[in-house]
Image: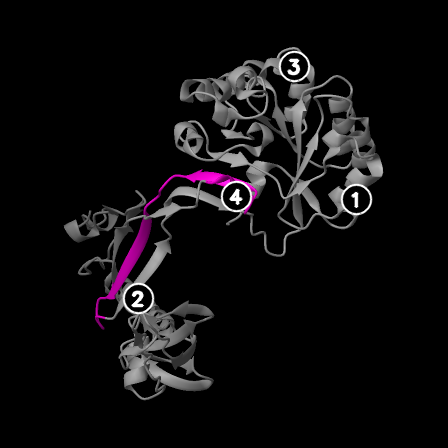
Amino acid sequence: MAGKHSAPKTQAQQPIKTVTGQPMYVPEGATPRKRRRGGCLLGLFAVALIAAGVATAAYFYMNPPRYNVTVNGETVTVDRGATIADVIEAGYASPVAGNLMAIDGTVATEGGGDPFAATVNGTPTTDAKTPLDRDAVVEIADGADQVETETVTTEAIPYGTVGSERTLDAYWTGSLHVNQKGQEGERTVRTGDVSGVVIDEQTKAPVDEGYRIYTANVGEDKVIALTFDDGPWPDTTDAILDVLEANGAKATFFTIGNQVAPYAAQVKREAELGCQVCTHSWDHASGSGQGVNLTYMSAEEQVNEITQGYAAIKEVLGEEPSHVFRAPGGNYYGDIISTLAPYVDAEVGWDIDTEDWRLPGSDAIYEAIMSAKPGQVILMHDGGGDRWQTVEAVKRAVPELVAQGYRLVTVDELLAYEG
């Protein structure tokens, strides 16, 4: 019967499943509603638009198209990326360019130097392309002068010759008798690359070749050369060295070659104290030289006297001695000068002869020493006989000379001064 049976369900009344899996009945004639996504997309677009705006604003805040800088204490507005050249062109600074100077100090090109001098935030620059960041502090001043480039050439200056007389009388006109080796000088020619100015300078003086007699020109220097002949000798050589060592003084010892080996300890001590060890010939011109004059000897004998003297010193000290010697009796004149020139750099005479070999008493020797003037050579003896008067005089004189401001130097040190 119709009352007992419910109407059959239509298709519209059939349950449908939702996204949760639960059945949902849709009334007859109704259509299921679909979820709308358009509003979500609009929201996302709006957020993106806002973000882009913020980013753009931040970019322009960090990189404004125009910003302020300070130029010479004045705040000015410039375009982003402006340089020093831009602010100068805009008239914010008016520096005057320096000049290009010739090598002689005259103006080669007016305005040819640095166009300006500037600092950017305290850092110096002369580059017009230096960029100016926001809030940069710029100081722009006049440009500095510059010196033109130059071309430099050098050329040798030939040396000449000198020739002091080689007589015995000429020997006494100076204490230093030097076989001077010639040395070329040097001239430097500088030419300005823009101005063409030429400056010719002697940068090294030539040294003339030849034999020179002179006394050292020491200027204001208070220097004296003490020299001792005829050693080494037992006792007295050491006694003199004691005085020198105690006073920080030096001297030159002209040794007899055949006495060097027997008294090697004294010779070594001389060198250790900074004294100069030279030769006074091998045996004081014994034989044909009559014990005093090398000029009486043959050329071969003269050479042997010198070379054997050098060899004796070298054997003890282990090194070649300076080629400085003193001829016995000061007899160095005439042909011997040419004969010994290849073996001798300088022969040393004296300005003051204490005549201690005469044994005049220590007071007389002391007075002779104290009469010396700067640059002079004093002759004494540490060997060849009883030299205790000399020792006593040296004990008194050396401390006094040092107290007066004198430096007691070697002959080599004296030779370093000009004539």
Ranked by sequence position, the earlier of labels 1 and 4 is 4
Q: Nearer the observer, disc 2 or disc 4?
A: 4
Question: Of residues 185 and 377, which is closer to you in this image?
Answer: 377
Residue at numbered disc 1: 367
Q: Is residue 283 left or right of residue 356?
A: left
Q: Nearer the observer, disc 3 or disc 1?
A: 1
Ranked by sequence position, the earlier of labels 3 and 1 is 3
Distance from Cα at disc 3 to Cα at disc 2? 111 Å
Establish if 307 lies above or below 374. above
Residue range highlighted in magenta: 167-196
Residue at numbered disc 3: 264
Q: At label 1, which amino acid type do we have?
A: Glu
Work out whether residue 131 can be spotted: no
Q: Is residue 322 left or right of residue 259?
A: left
Residue at numbered disc 2: 43
Q: At label 3, which amino acid type do we have?
A: Ala
- Image quarter for residue 380? top right
State yes or no: discs 3 and 4 in contact (Cβ < 8 Å): no
Q: Position of residue 351 (x, y in %)?
A: 63, 44
Q: Nearer the observer, disc 3 or disc 4?
A: 4
Q: Nearer the observer, disc 1 or disc 2?
A: 1
Q: Position of residue 361 (x, y in %)?
A: 83, 34
Q: Position of residue 229 (x, y in %)?
A: 65, 28
Residue at numbered disc 4: 169
**Helix or strand or loop: what does disc 2 sit on?**
helix
Ranked by sequence position, the earlier of labels 3 and 2 is 2
